[in-house]
Image (cartoon, rainbow, N blue to C red):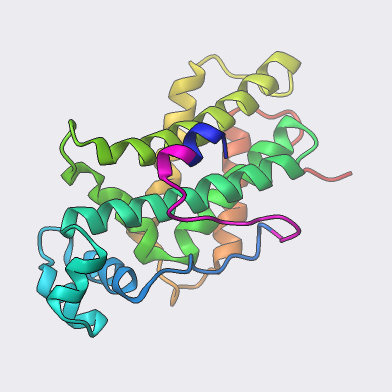
Amino acid sequence: MSDSAKAAAGKRFTVDTEGLDWRRREPVPLPTTLVAAKRAFYERGFHGTSIRDIASRAGVSLPTLYYHHDNKLGILVELLEAAMTSVLAWVGAAIEEGRTPSEKLSNAIESIVLHMTSDLELASVASEFRHLDPEDPRREPYIAMRTETENMLADVIQAGLDSGEFRFDQDVKDVLRYLFGACQAVTTWYRPSGARTPAEVAASYASIALRVVGAQDTNNND
């Protein structure tokens, strides 16, 4: 994560990936109040969830909840930051492990989908971003980290084009939007009780991404 993104996030959440396997994903550690909030937002949506509901689920009083959080929007902001901090850290680790543009892109997409499937409740919070006013400065940390993640993938795709490893005629930004949109949509259909594991879904999406960019070698084997 860049210094600017870290500063923007206020270091509220940190994810240390050093020495860890980016494919082995655990839910982002959160305080009880945020765990309750992400579950409520997932089940009822942002507007369908009251601050009292969050307090009740967390087993705390309203004064206690307000002591730790500004309001419901503030809670949403914290969850958005937690999710994006995790995405940025793990995507960075996944890209760093790759040796070629194909490996880097495959790893990055796999990492994003693992984020979506390993904690559906937290990943789904991104869809509630629209409830933040465009002028609300609390949006900035999330946007900064999201932009940095997008830029990392754009650099990988551009490197693949420049080297001839990727072949497509569309604008890089359009391809990037398509890939991100496909990954984000996983939360709308994936369920842990389904037939496929998170790893299987992630590997499938990574393979599809390589075909989208016209990768000349998509098996990523030595």
Q: Nearer the viewer, residue 138 or 38?
A: 138
Give the image location of residue 147, x and y in percent.
44, 31
Kindly tell me whether residue 133 is visible in this rendering.
yes
The x, y position of residue 178, in whole percent, is 43, 33
Start-end of magenta stretch: 7-21
Q: Is residue 56 above or below residue 70?
A: below
Task: Count the numbered circles shown.
Answer: 0
Residue at (18, 61) in percent of width and height: 45
| Magenta stretch, overall SS | loop
Q: Quarter of the image containing the C terminus?
A: top right
x and y, in percent, of residue 105 in the image: 64, 37
Left or right, residue 180 beside residue 135: right
Magenta stretch contains residue 20: yes
Q: Residue at x 22, y 81 (%)?
A: 57
Q: Quadrant of the N terminus?
A: top right
Q: Is residue 43 a member of the stretch shown in magenta?
A: no
Judge whether 212 appears above or below 170 on screen: below
Residue at figure coordinates x 49%, y 68% from the top left: 27
The image shows residue 100, relative to residue 193, as above or below, that is: above
Q: Position of residue 106 (x, y in %)?
A: 65, 42
Q: Is residue 52 left or right of residue 74?
A: left
Q: Is residue 73 rendered to the left or right of residue 110?
A: left
Quarter of the figure with residue 116:
bottom left
Going by the picture, which residue comes out furthest to the bottom?
59
Camera-side residue: 18 or 96?
18
Asked whether the viewer can see residue 205, the reply is no
Instruction: Indicate left or right for 180 with 203 as reference.
Output: left
Q: Residue at x 56, y 56 (%)?
A: 15
Q: Which of the 4 image quadrants contains residue 144?
A: top left
